[in-house]
Amino acid sequence: MNERPGCLSGLLKLAFVRWIYEGLQSRFGFGSGSCFGIGCGLILLIVFIAITCSILTGTNWFKLVLLPFYGYL
């Protein structure tokens, strides 16, 4: 079974991720103006880079992370 999404689906996912990322960054991250913005902004940046790489490569990170704990899923 081929579970790879089409091009339009991937572009829509990336647009949705960007929209969420910009909203969270302006509220909690680098654009918030608080001293916690740097730490939260960096955490959000790392999480959204991982999500973007997951969308672009089609990698299921949860399956890779949980593999040592549960064996083959």
Image: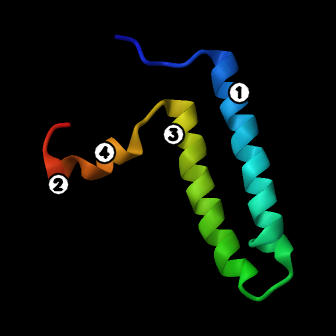
- In 3D space, how far apart are the residues under numbered discs 1 and 2 (Cα atoms)? 33 Å
Q: Which residue is identified by label 1? A: 11
Q: Which residue is identified by label 4? A: 64
Quadrant the C terminus occupies:
top left
What kind of element bears circle 1?
Answer: helix
List the single residue furthest toward the top.
1
Left or right of residue 11: residue 3: left
Q: Which residue is identified by label 2? A: 69
Assess whether mark 1 and mark 3 are in contact (beta carbons under 8 angstroms).
no
**Residue 67 coordinates in the image, percent (x, y):** 22, 46
Residue at image x 79%, y 46%?
19
- In 3D space, how far apart are the residues under numbered discs 4 and 3 (Cα atoms)? 12 Å
Residue 56, placed above or below residue 42:
above
Quadrant the N terminus occupies:
top left
What kind of element bears circle 3?
Answer: helix
- In 3D space, how far apart are the residues under numbered discs 4 and 2 (Cα atoms)? 10 Å
If you read the primary sequence from the N terminus, does the residue marked by circle 4 or circle 2 appear first?
A: 4
What kind of element bears circle 4?
Answer: helix
- In 3D space, how far apart are the residues under numbered discs 3 and 2 (Cα atoms)? 21 Å
